[in-house]
Amino acid sequence: MASTVPKTRSKPAARRQAGTRPRVSRRRASTDTGRERSPDAPGIMVSLNAEHRHIATLLDALSRQSDSLLPGRTPDLVMVRDIVRYLNDFPDQYHHPREDLLFELLGQRDPASRDAIARLEEGHREIYRRSRELLDLLGSDEAPPGEEARRHLKYLCDRYVGFYRDHINLEEGVVFPCATRKLRRSDWASVNDRSRQVDDPLFGARVRKEYRRLSRYLATRVERIGEEIAIAEVFGLEALVEGVVAGLSAVAEIRGIASKRARAVVGDCKEAVGQSVPMVQLPFVLAGSLRGHADDGVREVSEVLVRARGEFGEAVSVRLRHLRRLMA
């Protein structure tokens, strides 16, 4: 996916996102009388939020690798380094500077937003420092010696993920909606004029050589969703995931929904068996449980897809209609 970035380099930064990403309103807010309203604003917001979903996918992957630093597990430190290197190279150098342009203009239009903007600008600098700290620690392909070093690395990874997620929450929950309301046509034109097109080296049209292993890892995680969730076919997720793979977006949310519903169905099965439900009635009990959780799962997945429809496009819409037919 191509992203626009400032022609003059802005200060490096780093990003953060919370476990549940807040929804960012895509509707156009009404404007004051005589104020120009930019038709380009929603497109810019969609682009920034799509990049946030990509970052979220990597933060989830980094969190999994951090868990592998626990005693008795084997982390992939090369993978950890690849993830942090991408987050340092692309968002810090291209995504965040574009946000800084928005923040600069928003601070002029809306003085009340300056405190939040100052926190975000400092957040960009702080996450850059934490990115470099992790990269320096991961400079060698060999695992850090001893349990103490592993615990320290896990602490730094967890702190990094948490700070990045909180940072993104503040942007999407507070500052982005404010920018959509306050910035004018001339402001958006200024951002576009001071930006250039840069293809995302991992999620863009062509994956760079240094990120091919990471790209294969992310694709493999998507493909394993069906293997990890025993009743994924009930929700039509295997077909749905085919549409998700292209953008590698919203995967974590959909996987979490299906996993939660699958566990609930399994729990109902165990409860029915434990209560010695007659064999004649057991299929009807299980069918009712399956149908109820399937309906809930479809509704929750649909909500995720509504937020991501601009990225998924018609391919996912077709698969969603197929999913609904399965649940009919």
Image (cartoon, rainbow, N blue to C red):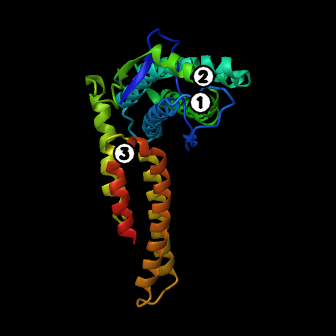
Type of residue at label 2? Gly
Q: CA distance from mark 2 to mark 3?
A: 33 Å
Q: CA distance from mark 3 to mark 1?
A: 28 Å
Q: Which residue is more in the foreground, 15 or 65?
A: 15
Residue at 52% from the left image edge and 16% from the top image edge: 190
Q: Quadrant of the N terminus?
A: top left
Type of residue at label 3? Gly
Which element carries disc 1, helix, strand or loop? helix
Image quadrant where residue 18 sits: top right
Q: Position of residue 86 (x, y in %)?
A: 40, 24
Q: Which mark is residue 266?
A: none
Q: Position of residue 182 (x, y in %)?
A: 64, 27
The first of marks 2 and 1 along the sequence is: 2
Asked if the residue under mark 1 is in contact with the one under mark 2, i.e. CB atoms within 8 Å, the reply is yes
The residue identified by callout 2 is 123
Q: Quadrant of the C terminus?
A: bottom left
User: Would you place residue 271 above or below residue 51 in this image?
Assistant: below
Asked if the residue under mark 3 is in contact with the one under mark 2, i.e. CB atoms within 8 Å, the reply is no
The mark total stands at 3
Which element carries disc 2, helix, strand or loop? helix
Residue at 50% from the left image edge and 53% from the top image edge: 303
The residue identified by callout 1 is 167
Q: Residues within 10 Å of mark 2 (few under 14, many from 20)?
A: many
